């Protein structure tokens, strides 16, 4: 992949710069524990996901929407038998997520510091504005980035808008992220470059089929550390 034209590198945030999905995974398990006194089920993950998916277009991405989806699923699955106290426990799970310490992934600090010497670096992340701003501030990384864009959906149209706004030529643009669906595909479709750094835990909503990936040109790296090498 031709990388010598690259001038701007954008990073996804969740599960690319810091840990995110494991916090959700852990909360889903605690949610199931709360419901276990009401219903007999091995896993409620799919039921919860269906509610989340249905609510995405109303709430958008983020923890607050996830909290409401947990409450809605709890009411549905227990046929209204969930108690006020248990709903409070679910709300508390969401609040814990919102103040969870930001855990920067290995190699991120070093890589960001090295790359900002030679490139314009930015963050493009989707989600709840308040929550994402808060996390970026608490990460202590914000000052390294030239721009930070928090968007509601990572699709071709939104990437196009962001690039246009900052007058970035797509042929000089590289996106780095853990999600093929959100970070890699839309950017490749626009003619940009992308680097995929898989994370061990991926939300169902970000899964793609093999078909979606046919003819896509992107690079896959194991660790963010490798970025500096492939760019030099
Ligand atoms: Mg991500």
Image (cartoon, grey):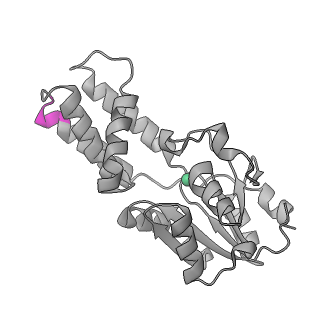
Q: Looking at the image, is 45 positioned above or below residue 61?
A: above
Give residue 105's position: percent from left, percent from top: 62, 52
Residue beneath the point at 20% across and 31% down: 76
Res. 62 visible in picture:
yes
Q: Measuring from the top left, give residue 153's x and y in whole percent.
A: 46, 61
* Horizontal and vertical percent position of residue 91: 24, 45
Residue 4 shown left or right of residue 9 in the figure? right
Residue 141 visible in the snapshot: no
**Would residue 219 be found to the left or right of residue 59 on screen?**
right
Chief secondary structure of the magenta portion: helix
Q: Quadrant of residue 184?
A: bottom right
Magenta region includes residue 189: no
* Magenta stretch in the rendered image: 82-86
- Give the percent coordinates (x, y) of residue 131: 38, 62
Question: Which quadrant of the figure has residue 59?
Answer: bottom left
Residue 51 vertical placement versus 159 (above, below): above
Q: In which quarter of the image is the C terminus?
A: bottom right
Query: Per the image, is 85 magenta?
Result: yes
Q: On the rendered structure, is 34 left or right of 4?
A: left
Residue occupying image coordinates x 12% and y 30%: 80
């Amino acid at each position: 992949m031709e990388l010598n034209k690259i001038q701007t590198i954008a990073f996804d945030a969740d599960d690319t710069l810091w840990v995110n999905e494991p916090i959700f995974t852990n909360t889903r398990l605690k949610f199931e524990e709360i419901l276990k006194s009401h219903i007999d089920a091995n896993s409620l993950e799919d039921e919860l996901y269906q509610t989340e998916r249905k609510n995405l277009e109303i709430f958008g991405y983020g923890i607050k929407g996830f909290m409401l989806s947990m409450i809605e699923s709890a009411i549905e699955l227990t046929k209204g038998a969930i108690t006020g106290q248990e709903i409070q426990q679910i709300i508390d799970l969401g609040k814990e997520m919102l103040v969870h310490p930001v855990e920067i992934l290995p190699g991120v600090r070093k890589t960001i510091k090295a790359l900002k010497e030679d490139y314009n670096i930015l963050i493009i992340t989707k989600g709840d504005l308040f929550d994402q701003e808060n996390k970026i501030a608490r990460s202590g990384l914000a000052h390294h980035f030239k721009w930070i864009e928090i968007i509601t959906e990572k699709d071709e149209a939104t990437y196009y808008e962001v690039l246009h706004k900052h007058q970035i030529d797509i042929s000089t643009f590289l996106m780095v992220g853990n999600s093929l669906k959100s970070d890699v595909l839309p950017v490749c479709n626009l003619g940009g470059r992308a680097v995929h750094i898989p994370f061990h835990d991926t939300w169902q909503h970000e899964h793609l089929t093999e078909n979606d990936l046919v003819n896509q040109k992107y690079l896959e790296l194991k660790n963010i550390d490798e970025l500096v090498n492939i760019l030099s």
